[in-house]
Image (spheres, helix red, strand yellow):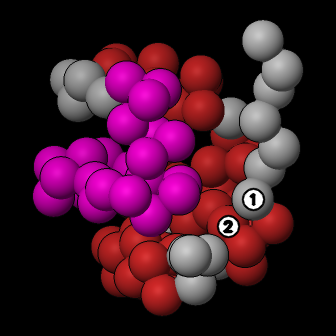
Amino acid sequence: MPRLRKDPRRRRTRFGRFIDGVGVGRLAQELEGLGVGVSRHALYGWLSGRIRPRPEAAMALRRLSKGELEIEDIYRHHDRMRKTRPG
């Protein structure tokens, strides 16, 4: 199965750059370690703007980022991706 190319729009947000830097697989494991079960599929949904992280997941992401992300960055990414979605 061919790998999907990363959507360059997601790199324009702090949230997208954070996930690209950490990696989806590693981030899913780290969230699981905090007791927030999130699948890789859900993380890709967040990146694409199809779904928003639940509040407890957003707070866990903020903790994991060690100050790199704020809650607003996470939800702003979703809103931006929705506005710029092709089609």
Can you give x and y, in whole percent of width and height, for residue 74 in the image? 41, 69
Callout 1: SS? loop
Q: Is residue 73 visible?
A: no
Q: Given this view, does label 2 or label 1 mark the residue nearer the observer? A: 1
Residue drawn 23% across and 30% down?
Answer: 36
Q: Residue type at mark 2? A: Arg
Give above or below for 2 relative to 41: above
The span shown in magenta is 39-61
How far is the residue under mark 2 from the one under mark 1?
6 Å
- Image coordinates for residue 75, horizontal then vertical, percent: 35, 75
Residue carrying label 1 = 7
Above or below — where is 25 with respect to 58? above
The overriding secondary structure of the stretch rendered in magenta is: helix
In the rendered structure, the answer to whether residue 39 lies left or right of residue 9 reads: left
Q: Is residue 52 magenta?
A: yes
Q: Residue 67: which numbered mark, if any?
A: none
| Residue 17 among magenta residues | no
Total of numbered circles in the picture?
2
The answer to whether the residues at label 2 and label 1 have Cβ atoms under 8 Å apart is yes
| Residue 10 image label | 2
Q: Residue 82 at what x, y percent from top left?
A: 44, 78
Task: Give the amino acid at mark 1.
Answer: Asp
Does residue 50 appear left or right of residue 81 in this picture?
Answer: left
Q: Residue 43, relative to residue 86: is it above or below?
A: above
Residue located at (83% from left, 44% from top):
5
Residue 52 is situated, as x and y percent measured from the top left of the image, at: 29, 60
Task: Pick the residue in front: 16 or 34.
Answer: 16
Q: Please tell me whether mark 2 sits on a helix, a strand or a loop.
A: helix
